[in-house]
Image (spheres, rainbow, N blue to C red):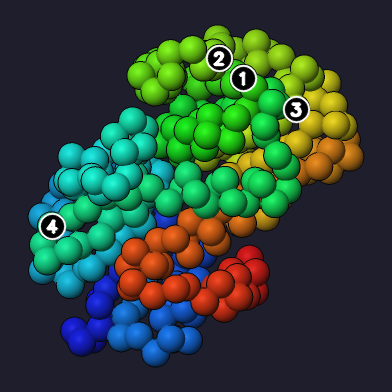
Amino acid sequence: MVTKNKKIFGLIGYPVKHSLSAYMHNAAFEYLGLQAHYELFEVPPPQLEDFFKNINTNNIYGLNVTIPHKESVMKFVELDFDSTHIQHIRAINTILNKNGKLIGYNTDIGGFSLDLLEKFNPQHKTVALFGAGGAARAVVYALYKLKAKEIYVYDINREKLGSLLEMMKKIDSSYPIFGVNSVSDLDIKQKDLLINATPVGMKETDPCLIDESMIHKNIFIYDLIYNPKETRLLKLAKQVKARYSNGLGMLLYQGILAFKLFTGREAPEEVMKEALWSHL
């Protein structure tokens, strides 16, 4: 922890060493002359409850949340009453400590939407999605609001997949979203957009989620992972000359939205962007 006169913000997850969030937020704090510091909190799941018991003692005023805690932290917070979507998706990525009361928000939805729309409009498009965890829940909700035509989802964890489908059933029972039993069942060659919302690709040893025969050059491939800058999936996209993006823009935009929640100030977008790009 840094000096006590500074407000502490940070990212909680496991792992978090790869994260660039601290560079982005600390650059913004310094630029605006705020007495605040952003840290990385690597907290294994068994230690999550103890971390939240000590949150006030440790002078923590706000948190971002990443894998694998986006759903499990729900039990430690109250929901932002203006964000009814969180009650549906049951996943948060931002927590604000208001005088000891922890309020949960989700800036992943807005961050993903803003970044995707700069590169690809999913309206009336068909989507294949890897993952059904907290990030995927935000992605599916965003795609639904952006009027994607239909979504096919694969996750090795059948319980998470079922929970995601149940979430959308409650939001709009007529919306065409389907869980599949295998990667091949995603039928990616017939899709307009492929999204990876799993951590597969963060490690050098991770396999590629698909092979070249499964995709076509007219598909847009979006990987929420931003470090490494090019996962095996994105290298494959480049190889077949398909358009693609990593999740750095999503990180930036969700961070901008979180920064305003943390400070009540408009985020210095260019300062935060430069901090991210220079450290990638």
Task: Please tell me whether mark 4 or mark 2 is closer to you in this view.
Answer: 2
Vertical placement of residue 148 versus 73, above or below: above
Q: Which amino acid is tagged 3?
A: Asp
Instruction: Look at 38% across and 47% down and name the residue there.
Output: 106
The residues bearing labels 2 and 1 have C-alpha atoms spaced at a distance of 5 Å
Can residue 12 be seen by looking at this rendering?
no
Q: Earlier in the sequence, mark 2 or mark 1?
A: 1
Element under disc 2 = loop
Estimate the x, y position of residue 47 in percent, counting from the top left. Answer: 20, 48
Q: Which mark is residue 150?
A: 1
Q: Earlier in the sequence, mark 4 or mark 3?
A: 4
Query: What kind of element bears circle 1?
Result: strand
The residue where tag 4 is placed is: 101
In the image, is residue 28 above or below residue 120? Answer: below
User: The residue tagged with tag 3: helix, strand or loop?
Assistant: loop
Give the alpha-carbon distance from disc 4 to disc 1, as whole Å: 38 Å
Q: Amino acid at mark 2?
A: Pro
